Amino acid sequence: MGVGSLSSHLVIVVVGGSMAGFQFGCLFTRPGAYVVTALRLLALPLFMMLGLWALGFNVTLASIAVLLTAMPSASMNVIFAEQYGGNVQFAAASVVQSMLFMMGSLPLIVFLMERVF
């Protein structure tokens, strides 16, 4: 077991540590986080889906690309925000919010993919 196997666990600790200072209700009071979440979970996958459909890509390849685009924001955003002096609480709120909303948006994207492809 090397150092590389600790990276995913360490990211979870960093995200949790950066959220320790604010309450759970603060996750839903940031309008900018809603914009980031809507773009990440709905707009980008729909744009990718329509683009790949219009270009006539293979169904399997297009489905994989759309599903990867529909995943929530990466937890590494919090580490980058902390390292480069960004807004760590906004990054943590966006990551957690996108993970929560992904439970509703991913089935919707899969449903739409079945209709388009």
Image: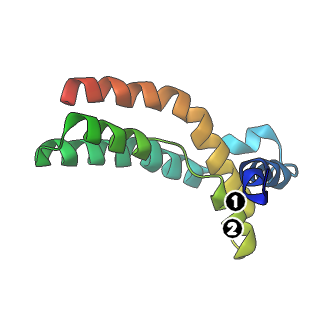
Q: Is residue 50 left or right of residue 97?
A: left
Q: Could you tell me the amino acid type at mark 2?
A: Ala
> Which residue is the extreme one toward the bottom?
84
Position in image of residue 72 (x %, y %): 54, 44
Position in image of residue 12 (x %, y %): 76, 47
Residue at left offset 62%, top offset 50%: 94
Residue at left offset 74%, top offset 51%: 5
Q: Do the residues labelled 2 and 1 touch (CB within 8 Å)?
A: yes
Q: Provide the residue designation for mark 1.
A: 78
Q: Is mark 1 on a helix, strand or loop?
A: helix
Q: In which quarter of the image is residue 108?
A: top left
Residue 81 shows which numbered tag? Answer: 2
Comparing 21 with 1, the one in front is: 1
Give the mark count: 2
Position in image of residue 62 (x %, y %): 26, 41
Q: Is residue 47 visible?
A: yes
Q: How crowded is mark 1: few (under 14 residues within 10 Å), some or many (20 or more)?
A: many
Comparing 22 with 2, the one in front is: 2
